[in-house]
Image (cartoon, grey):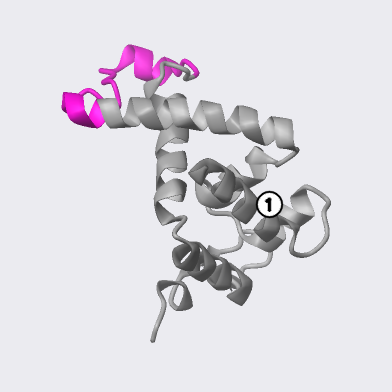
Amino acid sequence: MKHLSDNCRLPKSPKNGRVVSRRLQDRRLWEQIENLGFRKAAYCLTKGYSYICWGGHLRAVSWKEVRGSYREPYADFDDETLEFLFRCKCDYLRWSRLCDSLGLNRGAVMDILYFGKSLSAVDKFYGRRHGWAAANILAALSLYRR
């Protein structure tokens, strides 16, 4: 069976001009997330995070937007969708407090889920050993499901 991540090619790296692709370890993580039933948890976390950043009025002012015609990012959504996004935001905030109290790194989880960074890049950025990011994200997603 062919996976989406097999064909996932990222643009050429600006430093050395070579094409990079997702590693096998990342594909195994997404398979594990699917098998454990954490897909909905990952979806709700990313929606809550994006609503906080873009829909919760926590944005930086861009003079280009001020001079131009600025539209609210969630202006066209119906009430039911906005209710869902608000619940996702509340769940994200509750989850982030729990992560902080249990010593899980929620920034690493969002780097993988929302920003799409690879596991090895997250391991290197946080100065942890190989496999820490995968264990962290699985523990954090299981905490969200509780």
**Compared with residue 77, is residue 104 higher up or lower down, i.e. above or below?**
below
Q: Residue furthest front?
A: 146
Majority secondary structure of magenta residues: loop
Instruction: Residue 89: give x, y in percent of width and height.
Output: 43, 28
| Residue 77 visible in the picture | no
Q: In the picture, residue 37 is in which quadrant?
A: bottom left
Three-letter code for the amino acid on which mark 1 is drawn: Asn
Q: Can residue 37 be found in the magenta stretch?
A: no
Instruction: Residue 49: give x, y in percent of width and height.
Output: 47, 33
Q: Which residue is mark 1?
A: 136
Viewer-nearest residue: 7 or 64: 7
**Compared with residue 67, is residue 14 higher up or lower down, i.e. above or below?**
below
Instruction: State the residue at coordinates (29%, 17%).
Output: 68
How dense is the environment of label 1, judged by Cα within 10 Å: few (below 14), some, or many (20 and up)?
A: some
Instruction: Residue 121: give x, y in percent of width and height.
Output: 69, 57
Q: Which stretch is magenta?
A: 60-82
Q: Can residue 79 be found in the magenta stretch?
A: yes
- Look at the image and tell me in which quarter the N terminus lies: bottom left
